[in-house]
Image (cartoon, helix red, strand yellow):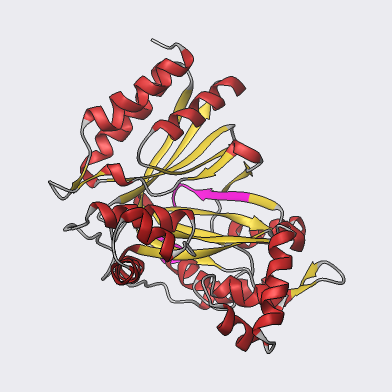
Amino acid sequence: MKLLQVIELEPTISIQELAKKTGVSWITANRHLQRLRDAQILSDPIAVFSPDRLGLERHIVFLRATAERSIEVLEDACDAHPYTHYRSRVYGPYTGIFAQFDIPPEGRTNLQRFLETLCKLDKCEIVELRRSTGHRVVSHTKLELFDPKTMTWNYDWTEWSDKIATSSDKIDTSSSSPTRSISLTQVDLQILRELTANANVNQAQLQEKLSISQSSVSRKMISLSENYIESVRAQIDRSRFDVTSTKLFYCPHADDAVRNRLFNAFSLESAPPFPISLDLLDDHGVLLWGRMPPSHEHKLFYTLWKILPDLQVFTMDTIRGHSRLYWFYPDNFDTDRKSWRSDTHWMIEQPMQELREKYGLR
């Protein structure tokens, strides 16, 4: 438990530092770490790139599916699109797909046209297409609040509700504008992809794969991590700690002061001790999603419902291939023009062609 507590906060920590922080020898720490891996409780961490720092904009999409078979087509459509960041099946107010796309600002029209093309195939209806304001925060799993003997979590929701009410109704907007000028080499792009697959990627193997020196690999990894990586996530099987329910909470319109208080409260150390993401959307929207113990999901709902009366709740189907987080896709960036590809062929025709070939669609 001590090892996991530290890894949750510092996913790429060295074995020596991990041993020091948990008060054991590095041999003991390494032995327990291997046991956790063998039991599939722990796997390699992943890096999540920042769309804003890369000059991209995150858009969230809700698609209402016409039938269960249609959901499979929509999943494959997300798989085929080069700018998909995440997708998951959802059910609740309606059944369909929730997806995130990280696209160039000039690509919004083509993203909408891509989604409208799917609708013309009679596979879905676009319920929401909203842009993230860039204000996002994630609460971490605080395993010190979990009792493994009783399999229960000790958390005071009333206290946190009070924290929301007393949090500031202002947020810092000085860094909300995305970076526009990006200069990345093909090697940079490939390293970003490797980091999103495994943040602990072996530098020696990367050196050989990319045919560059060890010092260059190390220097580029540090630079890319500092400038373009939003967070590094520990890959822990949280079902071992009863964190098994995956919910999505969406409010299409909320008062700005309320949104800001909620954002600031989620940034506090006292925020819910489960992996929950909060994203403030344009046109006053609010999106929250993540995992929690089934015995706590209703407490989160009622806490949010008090301040977000238009709240919609979805269950996210994350079983097997019904949910997917995508690696960084290097081919999206044109290194010669130093710009992201946003043309019709790249964002509409190519993914639709792949979909038509798979399903024999016209």
Q: Please give the name of the residue rendered at 22% of the width and 40% of the height, measured from the top-left corner.
A: 341
Left or right relative to 355: residue 338: left
Q: Is residue 44 magenta?
A: no
Q: In the image, residue 223 lies at what x, y percent?
A: 30, 70
Q: Does the segment drawn in magenta span residue 248? A: yes
Q: Quadrant of the N terminus?
A: bottom right
Q: Nearer the viewer, residue 27 or 320?
A: 27
Q: Confirm whether residue 49 shows in the render.
A: no
Quarter holding the C terminus is: top left
Give the quarter of the image for residue 360.
Answer: top left
Q: Position of residue 104 (x, y in %)?
A: 25, 46
- State the residue in front, 271 or 253: 271
Residue name at image x 30 percent, y 27 percent: 348
Outermost residue toward the right in this view: 149
Question: Which stretch appears magenta?
Answer: 247-259
Q: Does residue 141 lie above or below 356 as drawn?
A: below
